Image (spheres, rainbow, N blue to C red):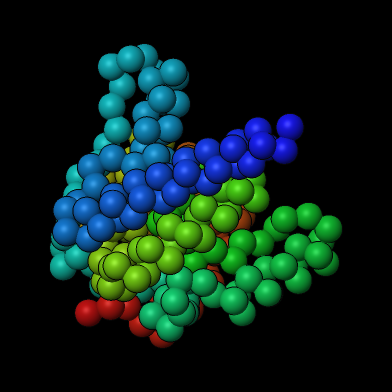
Amino acid sequence: MGRWFWRGGLVVLILVAYMQVGFFTAVLWWKYFNPSNTAFMAAGLDRLQEKKGPDAELHHKWVGYDRIAINLKRAVVAAEDNRFLEHDGFDWEGMQKAMEKDLKKGRIVAGGSTISQQLAKNLFLSPSKNPLRKVQEAAITVMIEQLWGKRRILEVYMNVIEWGNGIYGAEAAAHRYFKTSAAGLGPGHAVLMAAMIPNPRYYETHRMARGLLYRQGIIAARMWQASVPR
């Protein structure tokens, strides 16, 4: 019995190690080459095709970092991770504050995930809050932070995150909502797009939702102090 237990444990460890090598290889590849698909995009396509039929397609177009308006970069950092340039992938202070809010409310109401953590999840994982998934997210976050610079992290993040039903990345979102390019987004447009990030499919059709309007006000006040990679 004990022998089989240790053999089973060894097999599990080997499989986990192979998974980490796979993640590491993909992260290293995407340091130099742009991802055309992510775990969240694959899930989004399945959801869209189930709703609209097998011919449904995602809206996504990659644009380089310099072709994304500085307004949007600042608004996104102000909204999602205002210590983005300072931390090593984990905002421990933000996590503590989020935990305190959750304990006070008795349920999960606040998130402490950084842009790097969100990116790790978007690229490889699922929205699940399973503890094992969170451990894997942390491991991938370390890989991303060690292999990429902050500029590359923000560039990839803004090109792959969901911004509505079947809409991924800043360029597709700018065309969908404002009939312009990601480079042409003004401050007001940027604030709205940044405010949508936590729940983009809902906010796409509920532009006057109280939560969205509240977030816009906070982001508009903070974005001018937000520091972003050059």
Give the left or right position of residue 4, taking residue 102 as reference.
left
Residue 174, how many percent across, how many down?
A: 27, 51
- Give the answer, above or below, for where 83 lies relative to 166: below
- Give the answer, above or below, for where 76 lies relative to 211: below
The residue that appears at 36% across and 63% down in the rendered structure is: 144
Viewer-proximal residue, 165 or 153? Answer: 153
* Rendered image quadrant of residue 56: top left
* Rendered image quadrant of residue 43: top left
The quadrant of the image that shows the C terminus is: bottom left
Residue 60, how many percent across, how many down?
A: 25, 41
The residue that appears at 64% across and 45% down in the rendered structure is: 130
Viewer-proximal residue, 98 or 188? Answer: 98
Give the left or right position of residue 181, taking residue 117 as reference.
left
The residue that appears at 29% across and 50% down in the rendered structure is: 26
Residue 205, how many percent across, how many down?
A: 48, 39
The quadrant of the image that shows the N terminus is: top right
How many labels sit on residues?
Answer: 0
The residue that appears at 63% across and 71% down in the rendered structure is: 95
Viewer-proximal residue, 73 or 149? Answer: 149
Specify whether residue 36 is in view. Answer: yes
Give the left or right position of residue 157, taking residue 43 as reference.
left
Residue 159, how many percent across, how many down?
A: 28, 53
